[in-house]
Amino acid sequence: MLIATSLCVASVLLLSPALTTRPIAVMPPLVIGVTVAADISPTLIPRVLAEAEAIWRPTGVVIAWEREGGMEMHAPLLRVWIGDGTGRGNRDEAMPLGWIGFEDDGSPTRNIYVSHANALALMNMMAGSSSAARMPRAERETMLGRAMGRALAHELGHYLLARRGHSEKGLMRARRTSAEFFARDATRFAIDDEQRAMVLSRLRPGGVLTAAAAAIPSAIPGEPGTHLGWTLDDAHSRKFERD
């Protein structure tokens, strides 16, 4: 349940010592497990996660990534799978760069998939396959990190907002051009004040997300619609359009 709050602004001169020394509430971290296909470059993944985290950081959301195989101190509330699944797209349709499933009751599942294969295909289409192949690895992974990280941030939005729908602008816009995915400037992926307030209310101690018991998934949802119990709305997939 969302909790409405109000913010009162007062002059510092009118505050009592007790109020001025009150500790600032710290938002609990959002623990997200990360599972990566073995054939994906390990130096790419930190770029993907950093891009997604940078988009959410201004809202006050703190993300704690826990890579599979590491020492997991907490059961992850959510798990991100990064691999070469391609979803339902093909060369004649917009391809999803990422997706999240929804249960029959409309609530989001605790699994997000980010497609390395589709991001690479998008980069090849934009730059030309021969040009992309000649890129230094650092440049190629910087580009892929932006696109995949922005797609991940978008799918995180579906989970944190518990919404299937999209907005007309900002992070939760449904369709993007390839230029937007790869541009240095990420301002078109901003999160608005209403979305920020909703997410923080769900993440506060005692909120919907912090109270949820997390279970680590046991199967990789490589293709939307094939994972048991999942449904996927094509209209919500993270898609791109050619420039």
Image (cartoon, rainbow, N blue to C red):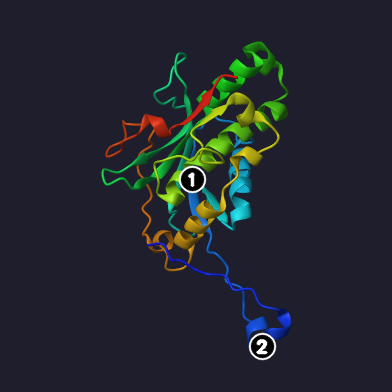
Q: Outermost residue toward the bottom?
A: 17
Alpha-carbon neighbours of circle 2 within 10 Å: few (<14), some, or many (≥20)? few
Looking at the image, residue 2 sits to the left or right of residue 225; the answer is right
* Disc 1: CA contacts within 10 A as few (<14), some (14-19) or many (>=20): many
Q: How far apart are marks 2 and 1 (CA)?
A: 40 Å
**Disc nearer the start of the sequence (2/1):** 2
- Residue 189 or 96: which is nearer the viewer? 189
Q: What x and y, as percent, mark residue 59?
A: 59, 55
> Which residue is drawn at the image coordinates 48% and 48% (left, top)?
33
- Identified at 31% across, 45% down, the residue is 106
Given residues 54 and 120, the one toward you in this image is 54
Provide the residue designation for mark 1. Answer: 156
Q: Residue at x 40, y 46 (%)?
A: 163
Question: Which residue is denoted by mark 2 in the rendering?
Answer: 16
Q: Is residue 25 above or below residue 78?
A: below
The amino acid type of the residue labelled 1 equals Leu
Q: Contact (CB < 8 A) between labels 2 and 1?
A: no
On the picture, is 55 further left or further right than 137?
Answer: left
Q: In this view, does 82 lie to the left or right of 45?
A: left
Question: Which quadrant of the figure contains the N terminus?
Answer: bottom left
* Residue 67, horizontal then vertical, whole percent: 52, 46
